Image (spheres, grey):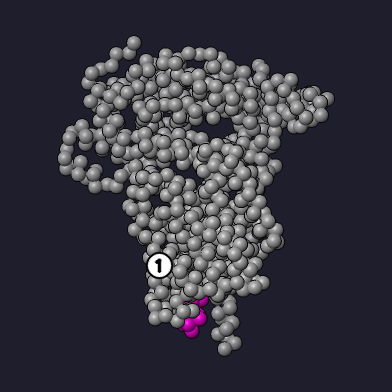
Amino acid sequence: MYRVPERSYDTSLILSDVLDEIGVNENVVLKTRRQGLICESLRTITYRLKGDNMTMYCFGSQTEGSTTIGIDSDADHLLCIENFKVITDAKDWTPGFNLLMIQDRSTSPGYCLLQIMDMNKPLLLNNERIGRLLFKNNFMEMALLEDRTRQGPSIAIPGQLGFCDQDYVYALRCKSWPKEARKWLSEKGAGKWPTEEVKSFAVDNGCFLVPVCSKRSAYKDSEWRISTSQAERALMFSLNITQLRCYVLMKMILKTFINPKFGGAITSYICKTVVFHCIKNADPHIWQKHRLVTCLTLCLSVLQYCIITENCPHFIINENNLILDRISKEVKHKLLDMFRIMILSNGYFLTDIKQDDLGFRFLNKMEENPMKAELLLSDSSQEQVIAGKLLRITAQILTDFHENLLSGLRNTSPNNAIRLTRSYIKTLYYWCRTNNRTERTGCMLMITSLCSTLGAMLASRDNFSQACLSDVAIKWLSAGLHSDVSSGRLKLASAYYCAGDIPKTNQVLDDVWRRYDRNVVEPVCACYNCKRTPERRGYRVFAQCHDEDALKHVLAFCVMFSRHEINSVPKELQYEMFRTTMYEYSQRNVNNSWMDMAVIDSYIYLLFLRYKTNRRLGVDTEKDALSDFIKGAVKEPNLRHKETAMNIIGQCFEKNGQVNAALTCYMKSLSMRPAINAAKVLICRLLSNIINN
């Protein structure tokens, strides 16, 4: 058995403390996993509500909790198309579209072919000329839009107008556990790991088939890779904190020492696989925080052995060699020299790692330098920063869901939009009773936003026909008040204002003003990505202490109005619903559906409605309200729709007869967003009025 050097104990404890400080601890890991699974359910529910038979999975470090702010790992999304039935035995055929998984000498280990079966009889389809009829792995290309490109098994959507690039891996589901992986089910590890519970979960959930072939494949257009991502996520969830920290350190080593010199010779997935093999075969008592350096050395030694033998077996499908054809002889010798130095250093090479200041923190604690310790303590808590980021991501996905559903109603009549929104809410309530806890949480988060939208649609219809709000509209708007700090309440205030009920408008706005603590509340928007300033400390502290329930206390969503809510919106904001010309519409990115709606930051809309209400009431604070409105648009950090704010401020100036100030605002708005901007219409209208008058 491997003997643990005594001198490594203190080093391991120090290293464990450092990793705890930068957020690799039980609290952050659990919060990260909870957030990842909720976001996964939010995306899946969105697809299902729209009638798409697809399931979204969030795999990788962002859901496992095996990353840090410095590592900044990508989120891996797998979109499973459920319309195809993949079977491993022809006896499992049922009427419909069946694909038979074929693994023979012609397929690489970990890969398969899919033969199409007759839809009405359990027979394989063959072509007289080419033999068996195989399902191609390029089926996605038929669905690709012009602005999308395929990169390996994924579809990439390039960013436009501030959008970030998005990668989605499409896959098919096979409910049967692959034959190649059945040996893994009977293998016993040193510490009875993986557990029987994890193995049972793996068998019950089957595997995925990803449309990509192996490098040596004879069927480049027909071979599919077998993915056991769901089983691997269950394995990651079963690790203790020392095992997880070991994997995080492996990724830091990869990013600091290996990737800069040797590119993709070693991947984080290879590192994960090595950690799995070590956990399975090593004494289970070794995985303790006072032996972290020993555990890391063990993992590095196993990875070194994989490089020597040029074989890193897939953890579940052992015949699949993960480093086949990845490492040249020249790179191999350099890598082995590097690993030899790291293994002999007893962990001291980690002082060169810059991610999350790990090396600096590690060296500082070993030297016990109080001056440097004070410098580190002055930094904000990494755990708070991570918690704030996780909560904001959940909010962005939630607002993205809302936008997605609203865009689907764009070409329907108002009455049909109301009917569909009601059906969405009814379906979500039904799913709340039938699905698991995570999905119930996702459904409840979605329902509140939809209630506000339904209420605003009904209010728009009421204001158009009778210029007052019905009890039904108020009921639905009230049901959506707790989606976040402000957006639901601002929709209610907006409906009251357009119905002419100024006292109630003022009452709701006063409530929002009290709740919107600018030392704590953060604006959030999913319309497009741009650089953010760090979140407020009060927000991060609150996010650290609460889960997704914090949404209603510390986050302010954008206020979104579809065209079906037009009569619940002041005229100044209605222009934003018609900002796109026919030419611009043809050039738009697929993620620009928000441009068919009036979308405004909550804080800006709050200031605007306060100004409008004070003007209607004729109170002395009208000028102060306009001044606050302007200051908020200019100075408030992390706002997204500043061009909309400038358009509305310009219209306020225009109504006050300040033509030059109005034109300045419109031009400023155009400089922020030169295309697809209502400022073009507002400038033309303003110039027309000047000429005619």
- The image shows residue 590 at horizontal and vertical percentages of 61, 52
Q: Quadrant of the N terminus?
A: top left
| Residue at the spot of label 1 | 632
- The image shows residue 398 at horizontal and vertical percentages of 52, 50
Residue at the front extreme of this rendering: 471
- The image shows residue 348 at horizontal and vertical percentages of 26, 28
Residue 117: image quadrant is: top right
- The image shows residue 271 at horizontal and vertical percentages of 43, 27
- Asked whether 115 or 566 is in front, the reply is 566
Q: Is residue 65 shown left or right of residue 54?
A: left
Image point (39%, 57%), residue name: 521
- Whether residue 538 is visible, yes or no, is yes
Q: Quadrant of the C terminus?
A: bottom right
Image point (49%, 28%), residue name: 234
Residue extent of the magenta highlight = 651-658
Image point (76%, 32%), residue name: 96
